[in-house]
Amino acid sequence: IVPQAPRLNQQPWARLEEYCRTLVGQGNELYIISGAYGRGGGGANGSATTLDQGRITVPARCWKVVVVLPAGTNDANRVTGSTRIIAVNLPNDNDVESSWGSYRVSVDALEAATGLDLLSALPAAVQDAVEARVDAGPVQ
């Protein structure tokens, strides 16, 4: 369970999910990794750090990484330094902007924030190239 502020869930998060469906409809395959980190978000009932008597942490940030590949096989080997990688890092509060595009970051930035090693199945040179870049592609 990842508690999300209503505006985050219904606007930029939902719009990114819609955009992902558009990319799939254009013949692409997507690999999506998402998560949350930090503590404390602001929703319809104000700020909170936990829910359910402290059993569920309310994260401060919600993030998503989308690897966009044309349909095919042997996917990890088809990722190159020019493969489109969309990475976003959004605040978990109702003051979030409606467009996900303004929250684009590099995968490297997400790794620094979360302590995770994302896209680790890629060859090191490719991983270094795609993780350092911030997506500048279209936003729907």
Image: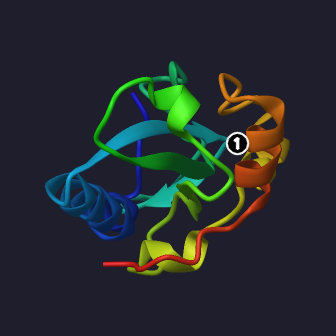
Whole-percent x, y for residue 9 in the image? 33, 57
Numbered label tally:
1
Amino acid found under the numbered disc labelled 1:
Gly
Task: Say which residue label 1 marks.
Answer: 38
Residue drawn 53% across the image and 47% down it: 65
Q: Is residue 37 left or right of residue 65?
A: right
Q: Nearer the viewer, residue 14 or 39?
A: 14
Residue 11 sits in which quadrant? bottom left
Residue drawn 29% across the image and 56% down it: 20
User: How many other residues sit within 10 Å of disc 1, few (<14), some (14-19) or many (≥20)?
Assistant: some
Q: Is residue 119 visible?
A: yes
Please say if 85 is above or below 120. below
Q: Disc 1 on helix, strand or loop?
A: loop
Q: Is residue 57 visible?
A: no
Q: Is residue 28 left or right of residue 54?
A: left
Work out which quarter of the rendered image holds the C terminus and state it. bottom left
Please say if 6 is above or below 98. above
Please say if 130 is above or below 51. below
Whole-percent x, y for residue 56 in the image? 49, 25
Q: Nearer the viewer, residue 54 or 71?
A: 71
Q: Residue furthest left?
A: 25
Residue drawn 42% across the image and 80% down it: 138
Q: Is residue 36 left or right of residue 101?
A: right
Q: Nearer the viewer, residue 17 or 135?
A: 135
